[in-house]
Image: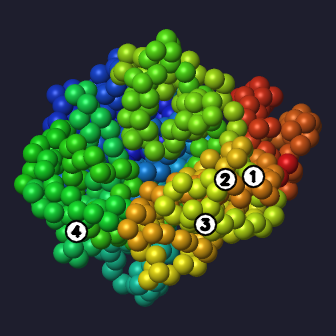
Amino acid sequence: MKKLNIGIMAHVDAGKTTVTEGFLYHSGIKNSMGNVDNGTTTTDSMELERQRGMTIRSATVSFLIGENKINLIDTPGHMDFIAEVERSLSVLDGVILVISAKEGVQPQTRAIFHKIQQMKIPTILFINKIDRMGVNLAEVYEQIHQQLTDSYLLMQKVAYQYSLVGQTYEISKRSFNETDFSEQIVVQSEKLLEKYMNEETITIEDYENVIRSRNRYGKLYPVYHGAALQNVGIKELMEAVGKWFMPRADKSSQLSAYVYKILFDEHHHKLCFTRVFSGEMVLRNHISIEREGQEMVIRNLFGLEKGGLVPKAAVEAGDVAVLLDVKELVCGDWMGERTKLPTISQTEPLLKVGVRPIPAANRRELLEALQILAMEDPYLDLNIDEETEEIKLKLFGNLQREILQSLLKERFHLEAEFDSVSTVKKDKPMDQVTCIVPMNSPGNLLRAGVGLILEPLEEGSGFQYETKVSFGDLTKSFQNGVKEGVEKGIRKGVFGEVVDTRVTFMYFDYDSVTSTPADFRRLAERVVYEALKSIGTRTMEPVMSYTLTAPQGYEKKIITELVRMNAVMEETKYTQTEMIMKGKVTLEACKDFSVILFTLTEGRGIFETVFWQYREQ
């Protein structure tokens, strides 16, 4: 049986959860399709998701398409939950990217597609909602061509007929006998092109092998059509999944498994969703956790079958295993050997917010709830200010703040007050500094001595750590303590997190009987603080690369706003109907610009940003 792990992704409201419902219905998991508006969908299981009619966290369900076992991950569509999308991508064999025929290619569609392209993940495009009045598929194809890729292949034709009572449409499968269709495929393969030029017979299997091969390496994207809410086009899309997607092959017998998702169920059990890349995960086996450098025993093992979890004695390579109540595991952990995954630049939350319990006496309960939410989403980066004792979280946007507030109320029955969202600013040392705190020096009651060099780096370098101390002189556990202490000190800084800095561990002192790794961890954090305080820091702000797309004719208004934001305009180009501007702007200045642009351009302008680097302002 072929096992495939696929994701359904899209801009919010494009219909991806409804597509999932169609898959579950046609595979026999459900007797009828659920409805997002009625709150009856399988993957949007949280009450909050049903209330808002949107996906907030990724969900995984399993079913069969013919002889293929499909583990399907339904992911959020809003930019505030981009981290959920990114975590899922690394474990997928293929993606269905849903595009609404009415709204066309939208900002999140582009953001997801660019991630997919970076990782060369096989992808099928599904144009949904083709039954809507006013749909112009030629325009949608042009948007795909201009904004996503010119390597798309229309697998179907859609013919509309209009009358006084409305519109009807018919979807027909394209034939390899159509010259323009077959030639699109032929030019993708030298072997096929040679056959074509020599007027040799090209079989259906030849054509299909080229589509499958080019799709596998992210070079060709089959396009299908439908109206998921009306159950149109779903069967054809399911057939396409089984035909064009191939499992990621890894024939090693050594276990390699990756934790891509953690969530807590209604009974407070911790579920660790794990993609098994090679080997086999076997109940009661001892396996190693790479991050911890320790072993664990698999005590509760489940697999995904028929839309639910079932106990398993073993889970094979290519499948998803769910481990229950394993305290040691966190998102991103590897068990056994690490498999080389396609690299992806993880989006970092650039906003922060303070949280307070109502009433204040519920602080302990609030912290416990936030710790659970931070295990499910590590990007929240739960932190407590040691001086003010304020509880702080990192976020991607205002919607995420609203969702967190609602989650605390729904899941944990807690009221909490959230501050306004503010930008995460970082510090950078003014100059190179060396700070040494020997053991037994005044004020050092710890059984350790640590010396560090901190030096500022060029903008965009991030944080770097290196050790000049030999592991023969100081054992790995003590050195790990130093590294962890430095990382904690860098996260805290003096006024905030530190960036674009190299820290070099160059001096140590210890007592072979009484010293512990914890002593080194605590002292290294303090040395970072002392070093930064002695040399002083400068404040760095997040700067974004932006792409602004708007219809021609709005230039004067848009440029006025960009000047007001002190944005740098680096490039402007024109298509037949649109103006596209690119440049740099601080996050603080552009936080609300999307709303302003929407008003300026009567809803036709798009403002996309990606983090560039922290810079002094």
Label number found at residue 529 = 2
The residue under the point 50% across, 38% down is 382
The three-letter code of the residue at mark 2 reads Tyr
Which amino acid is tagged 4?
Leu
- Residue 78 in percent (x, y) is at 53, 36
Q: CA distance from mark 1 to mark 2?
A: 6 Å
| Position in image of residue 505 (x %, y %) | 59, 71
Q: Considering depth in this image, is 163 or 517 the residue closer to the camera?
A: 517
Q: Name the quarter where the N terminus is drawn.
A: bottom left
Q: Earlier in the sequence, mark 1 or mark 3?
A: 3
Give the residue type at disc 1.
Lys
Relative to 4, say whether 39 is above or below: above
Residue 378, image x and y in percent?
Answer: 46, 44
Residue 368 in view, yes or no: yes
Q: Are marks 3 and 2 in contact (CB under 8 Å)?
A: no
Q: Secondary structure at mark 1?
A: helix
Between 484 and 351, the one nearer to me in the picture: 484
Name the residue at the top extreme. 359
How packed mark 1 is, by other alpha carbons closer than 10 Å (few <14, some 14-19, many 20 or more), is: some
Considering depth in this image, is 535 or 438 the residue closer to the camera?
Answer: 438
Horizontal placement of 390 versus 175: left or right?
Answer: right
Foreground tag (1 vs 3): 3
For the residues bearing labels 4 and 1, Cβ distance under 8 angstroms: no
Give neighbour class at mark 2: few <14, some 14-19, many 20+ (Cα, 10 Å): some
Q: Secondary structure at mark 4?
A: loop
Residue 165 appears anywhere in the view: no
Between marks 3 and 4, how big is the CA–CA gap? Answer: 44 Å
Q: Is residue 340 above or below residue 381?
A: below
Residue that mark 4 sits on: 255
